[in-house]
Image (spheres, rainbow, N blue to C red):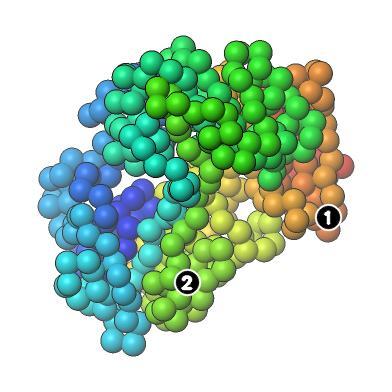
């Protein structure tokens, strides 16, 4: 059996490791665009702050791939999938045959048509080291453009380093796609309290008077690249569409991690879960199913960040358009707001700003399919 995994991040590497545990003789090929061995993206903010050394972010040694008999093809990308003849074509021209195929290429950082050495992104190790270098030579401000979780990490980084910080975003408040007005007001008040210059309604980074002396860090979200997947006849929506077993519409082709738009049995619709723990767990489930199991992925996903001392957490399905209603607990004036997302009378998601103590009750309530009135918050 020959397993090919496109994407050598945490989901793909976890799947390769799980496959080797399940089958000592299978051929396993892991294809990745980066040249570095697998590293923790979760630790990149800590590396940028100087809290964690560079060597501590790596999760494997280069010898690990050899020890596990995993063929690691680094510095190349998949350009075409032939699902009829069962092979993939990679950027160096080679054709790699497969019996089972797993796609774990994640999502691409969204960029802006704004160029220059002082413009930084924050997804890869290379991005992080460019940002570190720019901060070291910065004589101006740290300007963060965007209202996403990545933008939050960037603001936290600049504040941690004592830089004059600007938070600029298009919406009326940060995380405006998921946060209600009360939660948004709490975030804005907190940012101002820690000395951040908050600029809502900013259409471009230039609107805040960026100069060459500033570091401009962009965090406007991520989106998967899907054209090459659709060309192979694999169904896509916002991501690659899969069932709960992470199987696509094409036989023996699976998807996991940030690129998968999977049938979430907990919340009752297809969603994407762009976070590290879900990517790990999906990698394992996909690998087991590739090896012959019939396992469904079930998990209440969550994403958490700390914005200069303020905890901001999203749990479950926080798509406002897919909810029937929302319920607000707490207030900005009290220093904490929990927003509950309700569909068909049941709790399906929540955002927690300054109310980390609600996290377990919310997660358990979503997992159990409780009515929102049966979820006991403090």
- Residue 152: x percent and y percent? 55, 31
Instruction: Give the camera-side residue of 79 and 215.
Output: 215
Q: Is residue 326 left or right of residue 149?
A: right
Secondary element at tag 2: loop
The residue to which callout 2 is attached is 247
Nearer the observer, 304 or 345: 304
For the residue pair 286 and 151, the one nearer the viewer reads as: 151
Q: Are marks 1 and 2 in contact (CB under 8 Å)?
A: no
Task: Report the disc number at residue 155.
Answer: none
- Does residue 107 sit above or below 177 in this rendering? below
Q: Label 2 crowding class (10 Å Cα cut-off): few <14, some 14-19, many 20+?
A: many
Which residue corresponds to mark 1?
324
Residue 305 against residue 161 in the figure, above or below: below
Identify the residue shown where x is 73% and y is 24%: 186
At a point 33% along the width and 34% down the height, the residue shown is 117
Whether residue 175 is visible here, answered yes or no, is no
Q: Which SS class for mark 1?
A: loop
Query: Residue at the spot x=22%, y=45% of the render?
Result: 37
Q: Position of residue 216 (x, y in %)?
A: 45, 31
Foreground disc of the pair 1, 2: 1
- Residue 48 lies in what quarter of the image? top left
Say whether residue 23 is left or right of residue 320. Answer: left
| Position of 185 relative to 9 (above/below) | above
Residue at position x 72%, y 36% in the image = 172
Residue that lies at the very extreme toward the bottom in this rendered image: 84
């Amino acid at each position: 059996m020959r397993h090919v995994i496109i994407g050598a991040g945490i989901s793909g590497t976890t799947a390769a490791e799980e496959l080797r545990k399940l089958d000592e003789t299978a051929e396993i090929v892991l294809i990745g665009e980066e040249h570095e061995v697998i590293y923790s993206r979760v630790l990149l903010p800590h590396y940028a702050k100087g809290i964690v050394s560079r060597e501590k972010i790596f999760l494997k040694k280069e010898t690990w791939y050899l020890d596990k008999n995993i063929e690691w093809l680094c510095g190349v990308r998949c350009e075409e999938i032939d699902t009829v003849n069962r092979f993939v074509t990679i950027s160096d021209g080679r054709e790699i045959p497969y019996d089972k195929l797993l796609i774990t290429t994640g999502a691409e950082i969204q960029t802006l048509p704004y160029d220059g050495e002082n413009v930084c992104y924050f997804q890869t190790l290379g991005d992080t080291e460019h940002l570190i270098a720019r901060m070291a030579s910065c004589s101006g401000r740290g300007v963060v453009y965007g209202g996403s979780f990545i933008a939050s990490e960037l603001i936290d980084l600049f504040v941690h380093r004592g830089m004059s910080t600007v938070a600029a975003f298009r919406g009326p408040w940060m995380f405006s796609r998921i946060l209600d007005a009360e939660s948004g007001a709490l975030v804005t008040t907190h940012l101002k309290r820690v000395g951040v210059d908050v600029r809502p309604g900013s259409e471009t980074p230039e609107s805040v008077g960026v100069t060459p002396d500033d570091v401009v860090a962009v965090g406007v979200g991520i989106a998967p690249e899907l054209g090459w997947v659709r060309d192979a006849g694999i169904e896509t929506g916002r991501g690659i569409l899969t069932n709960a077993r992470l199987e696509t519409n094409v036989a023996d082709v699976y998807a996991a991690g940030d690129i998968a738009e999977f049938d979430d049995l907990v919340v009752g619709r297809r969603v994407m879960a762009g976070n590290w723990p879900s990517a790990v767990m999906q990698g394992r489930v996909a690998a087991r199913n590739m090896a012959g199991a019939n396992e469904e992925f079930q998990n209440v996903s969550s994403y958490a960040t700390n914005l200069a001392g303020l905890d901001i957490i999203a749990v479950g399905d926080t798509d406002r358009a897919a909810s029937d209603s929302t319920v607000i607990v707490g207030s900005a004036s009290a220093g904490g707001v929990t927003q509950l997302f309700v569909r068909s009378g049941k709790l399906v998601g929540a955002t927690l700003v300054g109310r980390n103590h609600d996290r377990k009750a919310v997660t358990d309530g979503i997992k159990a399919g409780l009515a929102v009135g049966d979820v006991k918050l403090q």
